[in-house]
Amino acid sequence: MQSIRSVIAGNEAGINDRKIKEIVVDREKASALSRELGWLRHVSEKYGFLISERNPAEIDALALGRTHGGILALCSERTVPALDRAEIKENGFYVMIEGIEDPYNFGYALRSLYAAGVDGIVLDERNWLSAAGVVARSSAGASEMFRVFTSKPTDAADLFKELGYSIVCADRDTPHTLEDSTIRFPVFLVVGGERRGISRALLDRADLKVKISYGREFRAALSAASAATILAYEIFRQNRIK
């Protein structure tokens, strides 16, 4: 239900153009979902979607996994625009996650980035937004509330640099630790996936490369979601309004 509310809220805010076509409900759970259904019926006329009841087998066949709670939204695709300088805030915080290989991990990262106050997400043209259902659920609806753009990674870095942003990249090979670095808005943060990391072309454009310190000897990389969370919250901490 959180993802459904986020689709509607994102639509109301003009953040995305995804439309709900139909809400389908497990008829055996309809009475337990009466509060949620009451609200959906209230807004259905405004947004032009149908509400129908189905048997449990039909719901399970439509759903991703079995933890849907008995209520699903059948939606249109979302238009994801190319990065445009006119859409970039003057003193903002934007993030690119390059090379992430799992839609759940991508969704978990978006959840944390949204909570940390990130203004927008920039993605390569090859990304996980085609798995919108998985991403919306794992991000607790945050994916539908974000302003999302596509761009070639190097083009995005060049544009943000032109606009006066600091390009900050996560890099395990740098001597600069996150906790000892000063990072002030405006910031374009780049986080790489666990296997491939960040491309050399992007690292070469960085104004600052930082690494996350570990509490013990550990050779493995953090998940992209974990790394993005730590980085984003430290940048939020340094720039919060007291």
Image (spheres, rainbow, N blue to C red):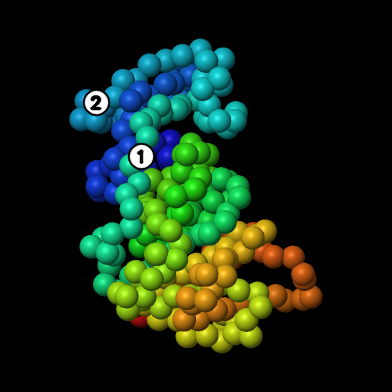
**Residue in the picture at 41% in, 29% down:** 73
Mark 1 or mark 2: which is in front?
1
Q: Position of residue 138 (x, y in %)?
A: 53, 45
Q: Earlier in the sequence, mark 1 or mark 2?
A: 2
Circle 1 sits on which residue?
78
- State the quadrant of the N terminus: top left
**Residue in the picture at 35% in, 23% down:** 22
Q: Residues within 10 Å of mark 2 (few under 14, many from 20)?
A: few
The number of callouts visible is 2
Residue type at tag 1: Arg
| Foreground pick, 41 / 193 | 193
| Foreground pick, 188 / 218 | 188
Q: Residues within 10 Å of mark 1 (few under 14, many from 20)?
A: some
Task: Find numbered disc 1 in the image and state the secondary structure of the residue it sits on.
Answer: loop
Q: CA distance from mark 1 to mark 2?
A: 17 Å
**Residue in the picture at 54% in, 65% down:** 191
146 shown above or below 181: above
128 shown above or below 192: above
Residue type at tag 2: Gly
Q: Which mark is on residue 48?
A: 2
Residue 218 appears in which quarter of the rendering?
Answer: bottom right
Residue placed farthest to the left in the image? Answer: 46
Specify whether 59 is left or right of 92. Answer: right
Task: Find numbered disc 2 in the image and state the secondary structure of the residue it sits on.
Answer: loop
Q: Position of residue 19 (x, y in %)?
A: 31, 33
- State the quadrant of the C terminus: bottom left
Residue 144 appears in which quarter of the rendering?
Answer: top left
**Residue in the picture at 40% in, 27% down:** 74
